[in-house]
Amino acid sequence: MIISASRRTDIPAFYSQWLINRIAAGYCAVPNPFNRKQISYISLSPEDVDAIVFWTRNPKPLLAHLQELDGRGLNYYFLFTLVNNPGEIDPYSPEVDKALAVFQELADKIGPERVIWRYDPIILGNITPASYHLDNFGRIAGKLAGYTKRCFISFVDFYRKASRRIDELKQKNITVNHSGNIRFRDVEPLVAELMRMAGSHDIRLLSCAEKMNLESLGVSPGKCIDDDLIRKVFKVDVSARKDPSQRKECGCAVSRDIGMYDSCLFGCSYCYATSSFNVAQRNYSEHDPTSPSLLGRYDAKPSVKKVKTDKACTVASKQLKLF
């Protein structure tokens, strides 16, 4: 079983202590996002977990716990989002130089193959034109040379949860073009140059659930939840079965996500996982790190009901002073 931690929120940045508590307990409770009365009890025991995949913009709070993860025999790798969008778009993301330092520190601890850079999503608009991304990507790639082996890119998609926030950007005269309005010929020069810059630093550029076919530019579709990587790095035999709950373009292997929506505090304007930042802040303030579930409290004690999917499956601070 592969654990995804998490597409729904940034567990390393905001909920590291909860995660460590749940690993010590051997399980966590995860309500169905669409029916909170349906609770899954997910095993976090090393014998049930093939790997944990961390999605984060700031893993620093988790760094102090890596030795414990290693001591328990858990395999893990990180998907580290580092984009450096303007504050109008990503208001609370870590400052780029501090994020780079944390990225480098993490890679020094666990190796560059296990820290994957996500320059994702790419937002094209009047304050983030192609020239912005060329300068920005080039600078970050230069700093990450030797600290990562691959980078995922895709162009931003708009989700219903983010529609009001996108409208608010428009009212501030900030334009944001989503992938449905972008044609291949419009981005071909940009992607070709990103590919060149990545290659010059020995970083493989891959796409993430991107509807446009970028393979003619050398950018192959990638898998964030990557069974091939897990087999190669950890010598664990996991299934390549595609996760049917993800978008058609997503190549990820099956995993179990242990996060919950409306709990991330980074405030990204395009976020699909947060319907209200005020709700997210309230949920965070009420978070109990001793609870079996990330939000709320689901105390029923699992016995054999703990989820152990077959091997075809895989699974801060309140002031945002994260460093």
Image: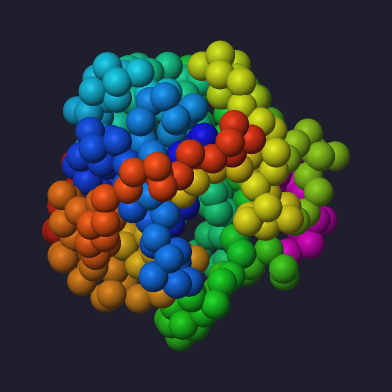
Characterize the magenta stretch by its predominant secondary structure. helix
- Give the side of residue 203 with respect to residue 8, left or right: right
Q: Position of residue 112 (x, y in %)?
A: 46, 20
- The magenta stretch is 182-193
Q: Position of residue 142 (x, y in %)?
A: 49, 27
Q: Does the stretch in magenta take in 68?
A: no
State the residue in front, 168 or 318: 318
At x 35% / y 30%, what residue is drawn?
Answer: 45
Instruction: Specify the quadrant that holds the C terminus.
Output: top left
At x 42% / y 54%, what residue is drawn?
Answer: 40
Q: Position of residue 207 (x, y in %)?
A: 67, 43
Can you tell which quarter of the image residue 175 is in?
Answer: bottom right
State the residue in front, 75 or 213: 75
Camera sees residue 162: yes
Q: Residue furthest bottom?
A: 171
As displayed, is residue 305 above or below residue 127? above
Camera sees residue 187: no
- Give the side of residue 13 with respect to residue 76, left or right: left
- Give the side of residue 244 with respect to residue 218, left or right: left
As displayed, is residue 143 above or below residue 232? below
Can you tell which quarter of the image residue 44 is in?
Answer: top left
